[in-house]
Amino acid sequence: MTRRRAITGHLETMGEIRGIMAAMKNMALAEHRKVGRRLEAQGRALRGIEAAAGDFLAFYPQPAPPPEALAPVWLVVGSERGFCGDFNEVLAREVLARAEGEPGPAPVLLAVGYKLGLRLDGRPGVARLLDGAGVADEVGGALAGVVAALRELEAERGPLAVTALHHDPDAGYPPLIHLAPEDLFARLVDQYLLAALTEVFLSSLLAENQQRMRHLEGALRRLDEHRRELALKANALRQEEITEEIEMILLNVEAGA
């Protein structure tokens, strides 16, 4: 009786856990759809900036610093939350693999996302551990932190060459301008950087939620299988108890006779 009650109690607890995990999966699905819509719109905006920049630079070319004059910075965008499998481990391994084979000066690392920061904290080259975005509505705040960190690094080290490491889920007339070409180019670079980083964050969130849904689906399958096994054990124990009760009744009847 005690063993069956323990199994029944375990079954009830696992049922509650399953409900929580199913709710988490549904939330990930809803966020996945929301991020997908925003990423599509952001992609159109970014392509528009790229087209405008290409048109502008075709008639007003701007001098670019030589590559060796740029300080390398790696922006590694991980996850703020867990339950997404090896999402952050893959990024950490990629950072280590690239760093070992990278020629020239070691890059400065900006690690975005609490869970990624736990895996990269204390490793050489990590200059900042920054807050990430758990949902699409938090992208703006996370980007503000990244831009501020980049501005600080630029003040310390000069012009930067920024590389983003993140998960990814797939001739004419001169343009009419109202600013000096060098002023317009500087503003265009700022706008493009913000638009490109926004697309990076949204792409990472989309991939994170895809992986979270797969991770939770697998966990739910394993949980359901375990619950079925426990239910069978509980039924078998109940049958044993019934058999024992019948045997006791029969023995009592025989003794009375």
Image (tube, rainbow, N blue to C red):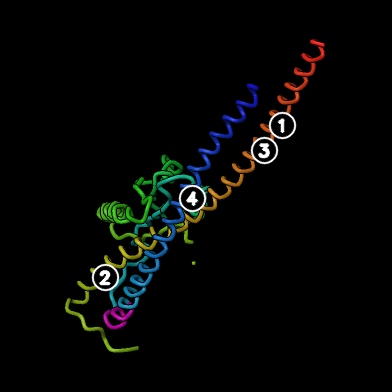
**Which numbered mark, 2 or 4, is in the foreground of this view?**
4
- Looking at marks 2 and 4 on the same chain, the residue that comes earlier in the sequence is marked by 4
Is label 1 in contact with label 2 (beta carbons under 8 Å)? no
The residues bearing labels 3 and 1 have C-alpha atoms spaced at a distance of 11 Å
Name which residue lies at 33% across and 59% down.
160
Q: Position of residue 147 (x, y in %)?
A: 28, 56
- Residue receiving disc 4: 25
Name which residue lies at 43% across and 42% down.
123
- Looking at marks 4 and 1 on the same chain, the residue that comes earlier in the sequence is marked by 4
Residue ranking furthest to the front: 257
Dot 3 crowding, Cα within 10 Å, few <14, some 14–19, many 20+: few
- Which disc, if any, is residue 229? 3
Highlighted range, magenta: 54-60
The quarter of the image holding the C terminus is top right
**Which numbered mark, 1 or 2, is in the foreground of this view?**
1
- Which disc, if any, is residue 188? 2
- Looking at marks 1 and 2 on the same chain, the residue that comes earlier in the sequence is marked by 2
- Looking at marks 3 and 1 on the same chain, the residue that comes earlier in the sequence is marked by 3
Dot 2 crowding, Cα within 10 Å, few <14, some 14–19, many 20+: some
- Looking at marks 3 and 4 on the same chain, the residue that comes earlier in the sequence is marked by 4
Secondary structure beneath dot 1 equals helix
The residues bearing labels 2 and 3 have C-alpha atoms spaced at a distance of 61 Å
The amino acid marked with disc number 3 is Glu
The residues bearing labels 4 and 1 have C-alpha atoms spaced at a distance of 33 Å
Q: Position of residue 156 (x, y in %)?
A: 27, 52
Is label 3 in contact with label 1 (beta carbons under 8 Å)? no
The amino acid marked with disc number 4 is Lys
Whether residue 170 sits left or right of residue 108 in the image: it is: right
The amino acid marked with disc number 2 is Leu
